[in-house]
Image: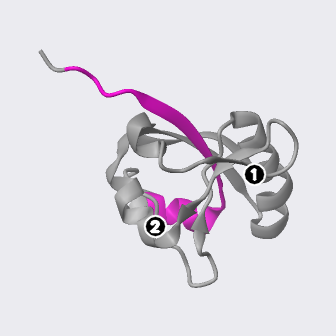
């Protein structure tokens, strides 16, 4: 009998270019960060992700998407939760050089759950 590893649900507000790269990775990984992006920021609640996708990505990229994905909880414990504003503005800060390791702990596919234009 196999036991299923505990996972944590994360969300990420995503612009169209990043979403295209996720699609090219078969919905299984996040693309490497650009030089000006030293940190990968998944967020801990859907509402916060919706606000960024709707209010920021649409303005800057013409479209915003909210993605949802699962990551092994044990692995995530190495990243302290960061409060980036109000009580529900919670995110993880994953250094760009650790993104490959982070991707290896994604369980299942990255899903698009909201789209704003």
The image quarter containing residue 108 is top left
Q: Give the colour scheme shown.
A: one colour
Query: Depth check: 86 or 15 in front?
Result: 86
Residue 63 image offset from top left, x and y in percent:
73, 58
Res 36 label: none
Where 117 sits versus 46, above or below? below
Q: Residue furthest top?
A: 1
Dot placed on the residue nearer the N-terminal end, 1 or 2: 2
Residue 117 can be seen, yes or no: no
Q: What residue is shown with label 2?
A: 31
Which residue appears at 42% of the width and 31% of the height? Answer: 7
Q: What residue is shown with label 1?
A: 53
Circle 2: element type: loop
Left or right of 27, for residue 20: right
Which residue appears at 39% of the width and 37% of the height? Answer: 74
Residue 65 image offset from top left, x and y in percent:
66, 50
State which quarter of the image contains the N terminus. top left
Left or right of 82, for residue 101: left
How busy is the neighbourhood of tag 2: few (under 14 within 10 Å), some, or many (20 plus)? some
Which residue appears at 38% of the width and 27% of the height? Answer: 6
Q: CA distance from mark 1 to mark 2?
A: 18 Å
How busy is the neighbourhood of tag 1: few (under 14 within 10 Å), some, or many (20 plus)? many
Query: Depth check: 97 or 112 in front?
Result: 97
Where 112 sits versus 34, above or below? above
Residue 52 part of the magenta-drawn span:
no
Residue 21 can be seen, yes or no: yes
- The residue range painted magenta reads 3-22
Residue 17 part of the magenta-drawn span:
yes
């Amino acid at each position: 009998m196999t036991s299923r590893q505990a996972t944590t649900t994360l969300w990420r507000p995503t612009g169209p270019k990043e979403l295209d790269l996720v699609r090219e990775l078969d919905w299984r990984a996040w693309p490497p960060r650009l030089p000006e992006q030293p940190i990968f920021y998944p967020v801990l609640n859907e509402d916060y992700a919706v606000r960024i996708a709707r209010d920021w990505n649409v303005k800057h990229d013409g479209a915003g998407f909210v993605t949802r994905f699962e990551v092994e909880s044990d692995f995530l414990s190495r990243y302290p939760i960061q409060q980036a504003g109000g009580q529900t503005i919670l995110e993880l800060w994953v250094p760009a050089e650790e993104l490959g390791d982070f991707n290896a702990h994604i369980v299942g596919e990255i899903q698009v759950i909201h789209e704003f234009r």
